[in-house]
Image (cartoon, grey):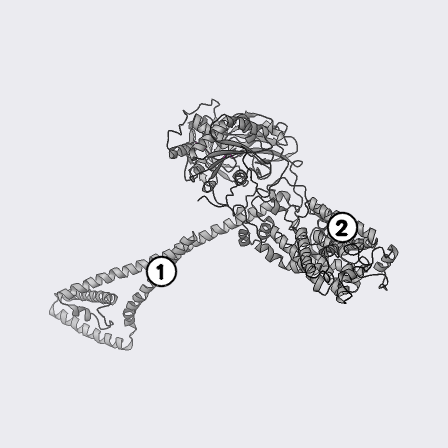
Amino acid sequence: MSARLFSFHGGVKPEHHKNESAGSPIRPAPLPTRLIVPLRHNTRAVAVCRVEPGQTVLKGERIGDAEGVLGTAVHAPASGTVVEIREHPMAHPSGLATTCVVIEPDGEERWVPHQPYDHLASDRQSTLNYLRDSGIVGMGGAAFPSHVKLGAGSGIETLVLNGAECEPWITCDDRLMRERAVTIIDGAIILFELIGARRILVGIEDNKPEAIAAMRAAAADCKAPIEVVAVPTRYPAGGEKQLIRVLTGIEIPHGKLGGEYGVQCFNVGTAHAVHRAIRHGEPLLSRVVTLTGNAAQPGNYEVLIGTPIADLLPLMQPKPGTDRYLLGGPMMGFALPDLSVPIVKGSNCIIAASQALFPEPEPELACIRCGECARACPADLQPFELYWYSRSRNFGKAQEYHLFDCIECGCCAFVCPSHIPLVDYYRFAKTEIWARERENTAASQARDRFEFRNYRIEREKAEKAARLAAKAAETKAKLAKTGEPVAIEKGGDDKPAVSSDDPKKALIAAALARAKQQKAEVEARNTTDLPPETAAEIAEIDARRKSLDLSSKATSTASSTPNQASPPSVESKLPQANDAADSTGTAVHVNEERK
Amino acid sequence: MIHSPYIRKPASVSSVMLTVLLALIPGIAMYVWQVGAGILVNLLIATIVAVAAEALVLKLRGRPVLLGIGDLSAVVTAWLIVLCFPPIVPWWITVIAVLVAIIAVKHLYGGLGQNPFNPAMVAYCAMIVAYPSLMSQWPPAGGLDFQTQLGLILGGMRDIDAVTAATALDAMRTGLRTGAGTIDAVMTQPTFGTLGGRGYEWIALGYLVGGLILLFRRTITWHMPVAFIVGLASTACLFWLFNPAQFASPLFHLASGGAMLAAFFIVTDPVSGATTPRGKLIFAAGIGILAYLIRAFGAFPEGIAFAVLLMNMCVPLIDMKTQPPVFGQRSRKLP
């Protein structure tokens, strides 16, 4: 029942260096004095802390709640006391800090009450929630939440179990498969039942015959349609998309998930964690980590999440000449900027690096377009073109040549005869593009906000004008009813002619009329009930003033212009408001398209 | 800070270039055996001039000199120039050609990896246009001893119509154009051997062996040599089948002139050639076809150099239009 194998383009065959640690069984790492458990476990999800400093926690107790689509829960890896919650550098090339819960283990390993979970008796969504709350994420490195993968897509034909472990030096999955094949297969069957697949394909590189034999023996003992396939040893055969391609012939494009193509892939470590969660009710608290490289005692250890890497180093007894430590394999891993960072769910290997094992690269020469990189690229890209455009900051062209399809596996840089650190150029180009996109987004958001503000101001003006117009029309109607339309007409001699069909003009006319009326009333009030002499005096003064007024009006008409000017200014603003509304509407529309 | 990958295959530009130089040795050995050791003098002169010119320009450009010389690319260029030229060409022609190739064609365009044209081919074209007669004087196989060759290379005066002969391609061309008769009649001249030029066909065999070494060592891929040979041979075959009396056989075209040198060492220059698999096929086949057309109908007996330059111009277009599909572009979603 050997399936037909497919092949992926490119790939390289570095020296595998598996023998250093492959022979040593998984041993539990000693309990560290402090566990530093990050609440962030991937770039997009941070758990919500639910403990406080000073609080005692039990082993397996939830200390962080899942939040967001990609969130999963975080648990106390050991019983003890929460000492503090603080920022701590994380296992990332940047060495940036993230919020961590620092736990001082009490060494008693008291478990929180837990029991097996019957996923067959529960509905699918609650099982997925259970896995989320058990903190199950992909153990292959990316720590992608498993419940999200399980929830995506329907009609999955094939469940692929990734035991390829193609990176040199790493042996944690190899040991896990050799020693815990039965639990891995059981976990795989749980995953298989959850996504309703029709078959399980386990892909293991053929340089791990013991693991293949163990997994085949375990698979033979169960009824599920499992096939353990030895795949040719060629880096990066363990890349999710490459392994799917090798086993099923399906190529999943960049940015797509396997679910859309009827195939879903999980790491063997993830299957093991699912088994622990479902059959034993244990959340994900530890993982197997390979300690190897320039070391006297390379080995594989079961390490609690949150164990500082510095605490693990003595276990492998690094030899003199070790000048740095790599997290992950030599092809895709990175040199740790800080040894106090904790092991997280995706940390699979720590390599003691020396100049002898990992020499400084030779000086970078010019690209001679030999095309070795294109022959090695498992994503079928033209790396030298990407290099050319990244180097010249022609990022648009780089994207045209599918920069973002690059999986940064390092094959191109591995084969390059000019020793060009090609992947660094792609990382540079990608981060530059991301930064520009962020700037563009921020700028367009600011522009949208500004345009909307203008629109809002104009709209409010227009609304106010409309309100006033309505009120004026009302007043006009009221006046018309009481039979005094003349009052408006007579409103003032310096007022422009009012056509009754123009509500705005009517409104202004009405307002002016009201103002005059009020003024007249006020004046009247001041001059009523006066003695006749005083009244005569006032009349005299008024007459004098009137003559003065007349003369001043004759000399200057400027004083009357503001009154005349105001109605057209209101008029001219209204169409503007409409224009603004239109243009803003278009802007919003464009913005939606952009999304 | 160094980023991943932390391991690298033991490969380098200098090892690539060294492989190319070693693969040229069978051809050079045949040259010495069949024509004489004069070629070695020119190789020496060209190598020294190329390295010196490279060092000078690198220094002027403020680039690391030893690193640049150490990649051996200048030596490869120098050797290819000499192997394209008549072995008794005066030393100063070699010097000018190498200077043109290294300074003008390579470094003025940005140095290693940046030149759009094949430096050796530009040098050849420049020289054959500038000094057509000196560039057409080929010694007959075994016709000149080393002393004479050395004298011709280093000496000033040349009265050499007595000692040189036309190449097979030249003789074929002249023979057919002057109406001397059919192919068979022309081929009876002493210049011709079994397939191509007498003696020179052995050199072609040497290049073929070296080319196979390059293929075997995976320094080059099969695309370019195969496409070039197929392009040249099939075009020749077409005309030959049409009129075998007036057009030489495809085998004659493959065995004469620089066809074998070009197929494995010149067309395959990665810097100025196409890079995608399909692009390589188009590029090399185009050179083969153009080379035949220039040989048969053009003004020069050998057309490969011009064909290479013409196709060099098309490389950006070819590469752009022949991008292979990336991973996942061929796949189809679930219904």
Q: Which residue is mark 2?
A: B205
Badge 1 crowding class, 10 Å Cα cut-off, few under 14, some 14 to 19, many 20 or more, is: few
Identified at 27% across, 72% down, the residue is A560
Tell me if A297 is positioned left or right of B103 in this view.
left
Identified at 45% across, 54% down, the residue is A443
Residue A426, labelled with which disc?
none
Which three-letter amino acid code belongs to the residue tagged 2? Answer: Leu
Q: Which residue is mark 1?
A: A582
Residue furthest top as drawn: A108
Foreground of the two, A104 or B88: B88
Q: Is residue A45 visible?
A: yes
Q: Position of residue A236 (x, y in %)?
A: 57, 39
Magenta extent:
A134-140
Q: Position of residue A386 (x, y in %)?
A: 58, 50
In this rendering, the answer to whether A462 lies above or below A289 is below
Q: Any magenta on residue A133?
A: no
Instruction: Determine the main secondary structure of the stretch shown in magenta.
Output: loop
Same-subunit check for callouts 2 and 1: no
